[in-house]
């Protein structure tokens, strides 16, 4: 297990975590949360070079014979029944040489809080058509209701990046969205003003929407798929947005420790940095 896998696996209040380190087959093991395994669909490449300290990864190709995605399936998750209204969603990603956004945005991952029919609410992490912008969105049905965009994100191609979003969901004007890119502090907090903001009030039961990595399912159809290598997607419950930012900063630090010629050692649950040769 890599340092990144070890760190995410050790986090409390996990809903789902998929390392994407599998190199054969179509099953993606969910590691320690309450959501289910994933299933690879379409055109993809397993065993791609992964995040430093993060094993291998999977490249999802929307230009193949069929669009590449990992369908996480109908999980029956009910945010209303859980009593939770704070969520953290994140992953590492790498965009290939020549990458360009098709349409308005392309989704790295999508999570439905009340997994169900076309009106089921969803959180999404996306790459925007606006230059150097990434976003966290909350949606109902096929349209995003509120976006928080991280403008000025350094989306350098062929380099690993990290996006982590925190969503506080509630009644209109009470919900908040925050997004961090490459471990940067949250900025430009966005208030959810839509009447659809109270996404934890009720649950639907249909099974034609799927949580997924690369793209978004609505009404059983895959849209907004992305051309990217993705690693270590995760979904958590948390109480404070400060806790979400700590997760983002720790993951970014762990990745960069290895790139800066260091070694990571875990002792009694804590990581320490040891420079090689010292």
Image (spheres, rainbow, N blue to C red):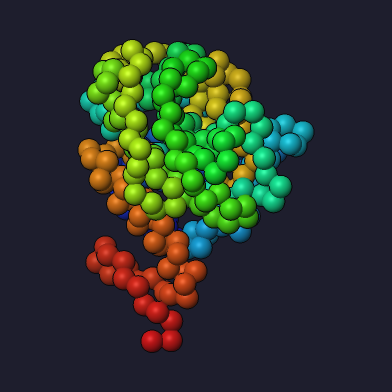
* Pick the front one: 47 or 154: 154
In this rendering, would 96 be left or right of 135?
right
Question: Image quarter for residue 166?
Answer: top left
Quarter of the image where the C terminus is located: bottom left
Q: Give the percent coordinates (x, y) of residue 123.
A: 42, 29
Quarter of the image where the N terminus is located: bottom left
Q: Give the percent coordinates (x, y) of residue 39.
A: 57, 36
Above or below: residue 104 compared with residue 43: above
Question: Image quarter for residue 251?
Answer: bottom left
Above or below: residue 188 compared with residue 173: below
> Is residue 246 visible in the rendered structure shown here?
yes
* Pick the front one: 74 or 272: 272
Question: Image quarter for residue 136?
Answer: top left
Task: Identify which residue is drawn at 47% across, 50% down.
Answer: 162
In this rendering, would 154 be left or right of 12?
right
Task: Identify which residue is drawn at 58% across, 53% down.
Answer: 156
Task: Identify which residue is drawn at 26% across, 63% down.
Answer: 269
Above or below: residue 119 compared with residue 76: above
Q: Give the percent coordinates (x, y) of residue 40.
A: 60, 37
* Pick the front one: 41 or 120: 120
> Is residue 82 visible in the rendered structure shown here?
no
Task: Identify which residue is drawn at 45% across, 13% down.
Answer: 119
- The total number of labels drawn is 0
Pick out the residue farthest to the bottom. 278
Q: Give the percent coordinates (x, y) of residue 35.
A: 40, 34
């Amino acid at each position: 297990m890599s340092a990144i896998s070890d760190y995410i696996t050790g986090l409390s209040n996990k809903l789902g975590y998929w390392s994407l380190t599998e190199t054969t087959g179509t099953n993606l093991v969910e590691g320690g949360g309450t959501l289910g395994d994933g299933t690879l669909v379409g055109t993809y490449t397993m065993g791609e070079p992964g995040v430093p300290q993060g094993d291998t990864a999977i490249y999802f190709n929307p230009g193949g014979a069929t669009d590449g995605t990992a369908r996480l399936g109908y999980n029956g998750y009910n945010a209303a029944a859980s009593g939770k209204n704070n969520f953290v969603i994140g992953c590492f990603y790498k965009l290939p040489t020549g990458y360009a956004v098709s349409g308005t945005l392309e989704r790295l991952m999508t999570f439905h809080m009340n997994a169900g029919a076309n009106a089921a609410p969803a959180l999404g992490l996306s790459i925007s058509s606006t230059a150097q912008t990434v976003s966290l969105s909350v949606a109902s049905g096929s349209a995003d209701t509120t976006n928080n965009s991280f403008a000025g994100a350094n989306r350098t191609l062929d380099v690993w990046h990290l996006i982590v979003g925190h969503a506080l969901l509630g009644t209109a004007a009470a919900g908040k969205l925050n997004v961090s890119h490459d471990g940067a502090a949250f900025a430009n907090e966005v208030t959810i003003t839509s009447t659809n903001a109270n996404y934890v009030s009720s649950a639907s039961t249909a099974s034609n929407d799927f949580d997924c990595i690369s793209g978004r399912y609505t009404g059983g159809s895959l849209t907004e798929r992305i051309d990217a290598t993705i690693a270590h997607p995760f979904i958590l419950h948390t109480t404070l947005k400060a806790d979400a930012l700590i997760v983002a900063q720790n993951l970014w630090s762990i990745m960069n420790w290895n790139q800066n010629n260091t070694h990571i050692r875990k002792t009694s649950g804590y990581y320490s940095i040891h420079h090689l040769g010292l």
